[in-house]
Image: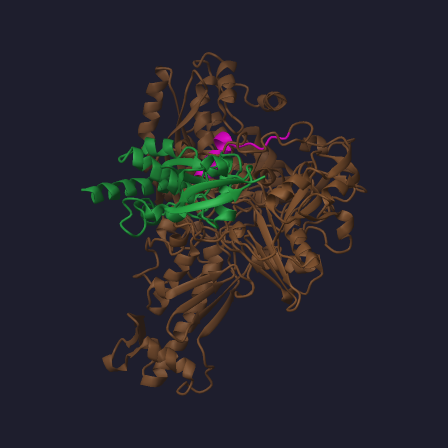
Amino acid sequence: MSVEIQVRVNGQPRQSTVEPRTLLVHYLRDVLGLTGTHVGCETSLCGACTVLLDGRAVKSCTMLAVQADGANITTIEGVSGLNGSNGGLHPVQEGFWEKHGLQCGFCTPGMICASVELLSKNPNPSEAEIRHALHGNLCRCTGYQKIVESVRYAAGKMKARKR
Amino acid sequence: MATATKFIGKPLKRKEDPRLIQGIAHYVDDLVLAGMLHAGFVRSPHAHAVVKSIDSTKAQSAPGVVGVFTAEDFRGQIGIVPCAAQLPDLKGAPRPVLATGRVRFVGEAVAVVVASDRYALRDAMDLVEVDYEPLTPVVDPEKAISKNAPVLHEPSADNVSFRWELEGGDVKRAFKQADKVIRQRILNQRLVPMAMEPRGVLAEYKRGEKTLTVWSSTQIPHLLKTQLAAMLGTPEHSVRVITPEVGGGFGSKLNVYPEEAIVAHLAMRLGHPVKWMESRRENFVCTIHGRDQIADVEAAVSKDGTLLGTKWRIIADLGAYYQLLTPLVPTLTGLMLAGSYKVPAIKIEIIGALTNKMATDAYRGAGRPEATYYVERLMDLIAAELKMDPAEIRRKNFPLPKEFPYTTPTGVAYDSANYQRSLDIALKKSGYAKLRKEQAALRKQGRYLGIGVSTYVEICAMGPSSAMPAGGWESATVRVEPTGKVTILTGASPHGQGQETSFAQMGAEVLGLTPDDVNVVHGDTGAVPYGIGTFGSRGTAVGGTAAYMSLVKLRDKLAKIVGHLTGEDPKNFVFGGGSISSKSSANKSISLGEAIGAAYTAKTLPQGMEPGLEATTFFEPTNFTFPFGAHVCVVEIDAETGGVRLLKYVAVDDCGNVLNPLLVEGQVHGGIVQSVGQAMFEEAVYDEHGQLITGELMDYAIPRADAMPWMETHRTVTPSPVNPLGVKGVGEAGTIGATPAIINAVVDALAPFGVRHVDMPVKRERIWKLMRRKAAPKRAPRAAAKAKPKKKSKSAARRRTSRRAR
């Protein structure tokens, strides 16, 4: 049995036929070839698969592709196309690069998507608010401190650009 | 090394990041090959059982299934899982790649299914029927080595894998002279390394060319290549191992696993590329674990706090089989039991116990975090017994800077250090004296602040080949390309450490270029000369040194060429800004491009000089390095809930010279937080049936973003004399120094309750109970300490049992 879905991924309209049990993350990775979204635990506990679904950070490993029907999805490959990116990297991406917010890079796409969501809701988060917002995204390399610095950097950058 | 540098020592942002932050890098699972099949493993739900039969009929005929294979199908075609550790009288515990007749831990693979896609595979795996006859499992390592325990590997008579003994100094005399003897049992719980990317393998065999290419998420591509050739009976020159991006390792990928050999074999057998990706659940049960030791220590001290001698008996739970370094890891604990102190006499006995669990092996720190934890707990126990300040007792027993190289009674030669200075800085930066006053004031209000100190030394930059099972050198080839770009090929195989940047900084420094001119290639045995890998804090100290030496060889060659062309003394040149300039005469300078051109066109070379610009170095270090430092941790314990909150963390680390301080800071942060994991949250718990009951992230808690206060890191710089860069290595420092600092802080907070030791992890329930065991904070806390350990350990064991049974 297959189901037809229509989604917009990183600005591109996509029409696909999927098995009803296909996970969103497998749809993105295996059908659309967007392998920047990673599978770290298959149980929504690690956050490596986080993408933006209509602007909200969701864990794509525990969501079915059919549940995303009609949604506007942004994966890490499309983050630079979001508002505030200034044509190049998104300020959150810049922040992670500038502040050494990553080491092995496996959690990074999910971390960046979760951070983008945070800054869209709260443009000037405190350290505690950043740590709370990233609570669902695990990183085993950095100890999180430089990730917090990365998000702060991005917040500053986005504020400066708005002015 | 030059003192004024342009790139070395500078906090350059990483060259590897643009691809990683845009999601356009490639980990194993991101690679797709035409005709690729997917493999999945059917694993034992029993810790110990006889496999009576496997019926794969239904699975074979399921949609999309290409084949189902059991040990029978691989008989004589895939060798056993390799173990490189060599110890005298090491008992055999051979592991076939698939269980042959008997399973010895939950998660051991009994069959492999191959199908055309992931979902068909998942369906078919459930259709494989395995008939098991359960046997009594052996879970507790002490019981495992006692008489009448069921034996894991017949025809052995017991489950003792090895007994390793080491003694130095006159231990008997030390204990005879002692004013006090302090005893304690200290547990170091089993941990799951939990790299964010699980393991994964993809293999492709090209029949015409007879080449087997294996992409694996590994820390050791070259060693894997050699072992795969041996396991598969394939000529090594036709095997190529590639590590694409590796999403963290922490030692868990410093190994050769059954799945790597089976997937490679299946690719050859089936004529299709085959991929296997580990699930997180599998990662918990069948990727190596770390730690898991029980240490009983006795220390002889004089009443002024001088250490006279220590005696250790350590039982290491090795699990059911040996992985690559399983029996070796506990011996590293043994080597570091002097800590950063002058202990005149040490006696050590380490017993390896075989149990029905996944193998333990090298997890970040590998044996040294255990040693440091025991020694640093011991120093606090002694301080408490003698009513001394924990900082003072440490200072009293440090070797002096002028005593380096300092050799411990067990023969380990520490290269260079100044322990006093790092402790002084840590105390000052943390405001130690003020904290003690604050602590006293808060106790009166019923608030429990704890201050923990740890002063550690680690053995790193693994290491001289004489002390390493597979060689301890590292290789690097540097090539200056005809267009002036530079390629560094390193045998070290980084996986997040950032050597694409730090080695490029070195290349730019030595040849007077920019880091963008230098490309660092690693993790491809088809491109890079044979190497050992990245582990044991060796990437920069050993691999970096090899790269540096190759760079210097090319700089010297270029200088000779320019000297020949200009008539200037080759020693008289400086490299920079794209030219090679004479220090004395401006008209004896030429552009770097011209010099490189001369090397390649080979028309005007000095007589006898080979054309080209490529140099290879196999660097063999003369010793390990011994990074060190001092950490101070402040916690507050909630008297109502037993909850431990970290308030402050100050780390002073000395990893010698530094190529990129940003990367060093990242390593220190990550290491400390992994320590926080062990101290406060993480515990791989097997129940009495040998089931891993903390087998997924829901039950096994790793630190999250809100676990930490803002860490304050400082560095002192004591260059290592062991390599020309003077670097010591930093990958494991955090995991080694931090665990005892945290637990010392927790015990310090609980001192008013008469608590002298707490086992990790310090979960609320455990602390809450300890605070209620003795209600009144005012009583003299440490009476009858000598009589306590046995009783205490029993109650600790009871606590563990009750928690596991729940």
Q: In the image, which residues are magenta? A: B673-686
State whether the magenta stretch is mostly helix, strand or loop.
Answer: helix
Q: Nearer the viewer, residue A117 or B789?
A: A117
Q: In the figure, the green chain has which letter?
A: A
Q: Position of residue B290 (x, y in %)?
A: 58, 40
Residue B328 appears in the rendering: yes
Q: Quadrant of residue B447?
A: top left
Q: Nearer the viewer, residue A69 or B647?
A: A69
Q: Is residue B667 left or right of residue A88?
A: right
Q: In the figure, the brown chain has which letter?
A: B
Q: Residue at x 45, y 37 (%)?
A: A68
Q: How was this image coloured?
A: by chain
Q: Is residue B445 left or right of residue B414?
A: left
Q: Residue furthest top?
A: B776
For the C terminus of chain B, give its image quadrant. top right
Q: Position of residue B468 (x, y in %)?
A: 59, 55
Q: Position of residue B254 (x, y in %)?
A: 57, 50
Q: Residue at x 43, y 33 (%)?
A: A136
Q: Quadrant of residue B561?
A: bottom left
Judge whether B281 appears above or below A31 on screen. above
Q: Residue at x 27, y 75 (%)?
A: B583
* In magenta segment, residue B109: no
Q: Residue at x 24, y 82 (%)?
A: B587
Judge whether B563 appears above or below B645 on screen. below
Q: Is residue A6 left or right of residue B121?
A: left
Q: Nearer the viewer, residue B726 or B557?
A: B557
* In magenta segment, residue B684: yes
